[in-house]
Image (cartoon, rainbow, N blue to C red):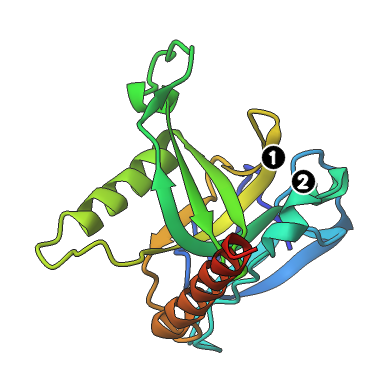
Amino acid sequence: MDAIIPNRAYNDKFRTRIREGNWYLLSDFKVVLSTRILRYSKHPYEIEFTCKTSIDRVSSRSRWNFFNDYDFTRINSAKAEDKDFVVDAIGVIHSVEPVGILPWVPRRGECDFESRYITFTIKDTLGKFMKCVALGKAGEDFLLQWEKRISRVEYSYEKIIASLRFWRISEYEGKPCLLTEVGCSKTFIDPNYPDFDNNHYISAFSICEEDELNEEVVEANF
């Protein structure tokens, strides 16, 4: 559910800084029908802060991360309304393309990396591929994680998982893709979550690859 925080004076209990992953108690806010063109949640309503709204830090209510990974088939057949909100996705990194440069001139105060983008492809446990395009800072963050991961001494070309959070369904070169959204999209390489088992996912992925190989062998024999 989206939350709107107008630039105004708030009461003493209003926190000006909140940290992702922490739990907070909101009080005295409005719930209104969302009419904004740019949205992040598919929920029809949104939270609107008032001058009386307070934010209090509370202890964690759950260990889960509440990821809702979208099926690649669903992304490929997305309707226009599916592109109005951001989604999560997960897969094994299949390929990473060289850094691209957008034909864009940075304005005063902006950094050169805002014109850079990284394109990579992930593959799910059903053998489906998805192109991902990370722009600006999101691209830099992905590249740093990727290079750090493959530069490890113990790296031996094993499968690497990429978990995408809050990406928007879009198009790249005329085909469906996942595109970063400014200010919210994140990528986690080889995520370590209480509610996600990396080894189990890799095992499921390996079984999928074995099935694909067996199908290729059968087709070659006919």
**Place of residue 71 in the rendered image (x, y in percent of width and height, measured from the top left):** 69, 64
**Place of residue 193 in the rendered image (x, y in percent of width and height, measured from the top left):** 43, 79
Q: Are marks 2 and 1 in contact (CB under 8 Å)?
A: yes
Going by the numbered disc 2, the residue's amino acid type is Lys
Relative to 196, residue 154 above or below: above
Residue at point 74%, 63% (across, down): 1
Relative to 143, residue 56 above or below: below
Q: In the rendered view of the protein, which quadrant contains the C terminus? A: bottom right
**Place of residue 29 in the rendered image (x, y in percent of width and height, measured from the top left):** 75, 65
Taking the image as shown, residue 91 lies to the left or right of residue 51, namely left
Q: Number of callouts in the render? A: 2
Residue holding disc 1: 170
**Place of residue 134 in the rendered image (x, y in percent of width and height, measured from the top left):** 48, 40
What separation in Å lies between label 2 and label 1 (alpha carbons)? 7 Å
Relative to 120, residue 204 above or below: below
**Extreme residue toward the left, this view:** 153
- Please, what secondary structure does the residue beneath circle 2 have? helix
